[in-house]
């Protein structure tokens, strides 16, 4: 495999995408946070002292996707076409799963943006609820799916089946 993140002297560089075609690209990432009973109750009843936790976390996740190139040094700044952050609340397990979907028409993928969105959303939940539970655990953050560009479709579920 050829690594194009380094120049001829071994210095880290941003990949040159000027020769690539503009294609439709999509990435979906997910992650989870485990909370205690008090936090879960406050989230589902919208009674957390800092406000509507999932609404704020959704907005923070979307904002996070737009800051990716400012935080990850070699990421290209992208003009995103679409970004969504959704949550699956599993009350019985005290787990909230965040899913971030990002779309772009561009020369490079949006995997990092989707991963950033998930992480920022989960960290926002932690921040808004830490007074009730400092032992919350963020876990299982990963890329679910990406499509577009030369490498084509990647689906984590299918990759895991092959292992």
Image (tube, rainbow, N blue to C red):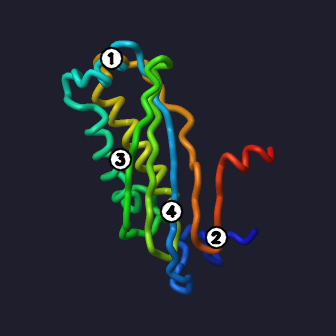
* Whether label 4 touches label 3, CB < 8 Å: no
Q: Which mark is residue 26?
A: 4
Q: Secondary structure at mark 4?
A: strand
Q: Which residue is mark 2?
A: 10
Q: Which residue is mark 1?
A: 41
Instruction: Give the crowd class for mark 2: few <14, some 14-19, many >=20 residues within 10 Å.
Output: few
- The foreground one among 68 and 94 is 94
Rendered view: 116 above or below 134: below
Give x and y (percent) for residue 8. 65, 78
Rendered view: 111 above or below 44: below
First in sequence: mark 4 vs mark 2: 2
Q: Secondary structure at mark 3?
A: helix
> Quarter of the image holding residue 19?
bottom right
Residue depicted at 36% across the width and 20% down the height: 40
First in sequence: mark 4 vs mark 3: 4
Q: Which residue is mark 3?
A: 61
First in sequence: mark 4 vs mark 1: 4
> Quarter of the image holding residue 15?
bottom right
* Whether label 4 touches label 1, CB < 8 Å: no
First in sequence: mark 3 vs mark 1: 1
């Amino acid at each position: 495999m050829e690594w194009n993140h380094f120049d001829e002297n071994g210095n880290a560089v941003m990949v040159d995408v000027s020769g690539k075609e503009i294609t439709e690209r999509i990435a979906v990432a997910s992650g989870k946070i485990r909370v205690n009973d008090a936090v879960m109750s406050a989230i589902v009843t919208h009674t957390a002292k800092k406000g509507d936790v999932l609404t704020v976390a959704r907005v923070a996740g979307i904002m996070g996707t737009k800051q990716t190139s400012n935080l990850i040094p070699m990421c290209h700044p992208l003009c995103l076409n679409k970004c969504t952050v959704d949550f699956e609340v599993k009350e019985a397990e005290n787990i909230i799963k965040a899913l971030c979907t990002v779309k772009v028409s561009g020369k490079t993928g949006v995997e990092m943006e989707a991963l950033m969105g998930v992480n920022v959303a989960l960290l926002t939940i932690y921040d808004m609820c830490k007074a009730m539970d400092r032992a919350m655990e963020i876990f299982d953050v990963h890329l679910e799916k990406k499509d577009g560009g030369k490498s084509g479709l990647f689906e984590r579920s299918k990759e895991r089946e092959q292992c």
